[in-house]
Image (spheres, helix red, strand yellow):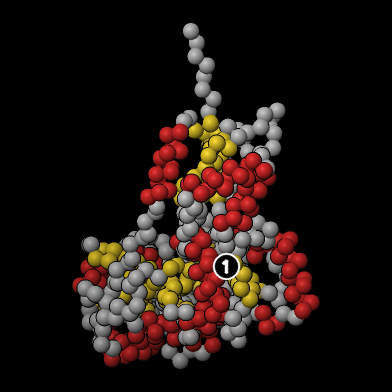
Amino acid sequence: MTEADGTWSDEAEFLRLDEQAADGQGGEEPALAQPVLAVVGRPNVGKSTLVNRILGRREAVVQDVPGVTRDRVAYDALWNGRRFTVVDTGGWEPGASGLQGSVAAQAELAMSTSDAVLLVVDATVGATTTDEAVARVLRRSKRPVLLAANKVDDERLLAETASLWSLGLGEPHPVSALHGRSSGDLLDAIVDALPEAPRDLGTTAGGPRRVALVGKPNVGKSSLLNKLTGEERAVVDSVAGTTVDPVDSLVELDGQLWRFVDTAGLRKRVQTASGMEYYASLRTKSAIDAAEVVIVLLDASEPVSEQDLRVVTMVAEAGRALVLAFNKWDLVDDERRHQLDRELDRGLVRVPWAERVNVSALTGRAVRKLAPALRTALQSWDQRVPTGQLNGWLSDLVAATPPPVRGGKQPKILFATQAGIRPPTLVLFTTGFLEAGYRRFVERKFRERFGFKGSPVRINVRVREKKPKKTR
């Protein structure tokens, strides 16, 4: 992976980059545990819109149809100096079956693992039998419960909220998630209800490495996540596109804790997607950007598609460590394996360095091999080659195979340094432009010598500026 040329005037810039390389890059501070607020309610009462209002930014996917949110999705929130986690959930329909039953189960689990619960009711409709059923469950819980009467867009609806006292959850808070009316008062009440620290800190301390799980729709991402966690963490259905929001899960593999993010399947380019699909695509891209390593899941039983290649390219361009997981391997016979090898040699020529694992989310085949592949990719992503060792190797390489002549002159590579990690980035200081083919040659030989399996390597070229001739 190469980038455009720059220019440099003297060795001062090289020395600065070399000092930065010697200092290294510090890791991120581990996030402190935060109290958790679960936002629940029946479908289409405006939960995700209210979540976005609480966050002060558009994070949760919103569309004017019921059932857009299906999994429980966690976001970080801040109000008056207090940090807390907001968990958006799918609409809860007691007694639902099939896909809606799975959605309801996720909502129930969110309530059981939270520190406080916010029940959202549509004030224009009033308390329904579903709202009453949810309220009965919440009254039996041992955690604080707040009641938000949403869609109170003007004064005329304020009187209607009084009837919601009948739910037995205390004073209803009239708000308009769409317009922001009284959202500050609701946030004050939320902060007052939440404890200073979560009731169960769990095992999140220590900063688990972040893994994004991406791929085209219905390739088995949620099924793989459920197999890894050993629970129905993500809603799974045979209908493509069940997952809309990224879903966070802490997964222990080989004694190490990882933070997995299941994402929506990427159907179209972000620029051409629309509505719910557009925002889901943005969330997926954000999940890749926020991850340290990405597992791209491909269906081994089907030909590698343009969608698959586009997802892989997106990860490589984001500079993230990469593991290719070929799912449904239990459906692959010898003929398909031979055909798949040819497809990979032709289609994945840009990422020959990616780690590869053959798995089956259905049977659990080889899913435990993902942990070693993730560790290898991250070790490469964090790897640094000392400047002296790098230049010694580069001198031998250039002596054996010098850069091609361009414009009648042969450029010289004067020295190099690894200017950064995550991803590893080499800077070559030269007297002239280096052809793209020669840069790829340098990268290939660099990998043969130093490894970097599972990580992209970026090569930047800095061409020395010609000093103007002195005039007498």
Question: Which residue is pictured at 34% across the width and 85% down the height?
Answer: 112
Question: Which residue is pictured at 37% across the width and 50% down the height?
Answer: 23
Coordinates of residue 329 in the picture (x, y in percent): 67, 79
Question: Which residue is pictured at 69% across the width and 37% down the height?
Answer: 404
Coordinates of residue 192 in the picture (x, y in percent): 20, 72
Relative depth, front residue between 341 and 152: 341
Q: Is residue 82 left or right of residue 300?
A: left
Coordinates of residue 172 in the picture (x, y in percent): 26, 77
Coordinates of residue 387 in the picture (x, y in percent): 48, 47
Relative depth, front residue between 186 and 127: 186
Q: Residues within 10 Å of mark 1 (few under 14, many from 20)?
A: many
Indicate the amino acid at tag 1: Val
Residue that badge 1 annotates: 323
Residue 469 seen in this snapshot: yes
Residue 173 seen in this snapshot: no
Question: What number of labels is visible?
Answer: 1
Identify the residue at the far right of this view: 335
Identify the residue at the far top of this view: 472
Secondary structure found at label 1: strand
| Image vertical order of residue 167 relative to residue 459, above or below | below
Q: Is residue 41 left or right of residue 246?
A: left
| Image vertical order of residue 165 relative to residue 286, above or below | below
Question: Which residue is pictured at 51% across the width and 90% down the height?
Answer: 97
| Image vertical order of residue 316 relative to residue 426, above or below | below
Relative depth, front residue between 96 and 361: 361
| Image vertical order of residue 378 relative to residue 326, above or below | above
Q: Is residue 461 left or right of residue 154?
A: right
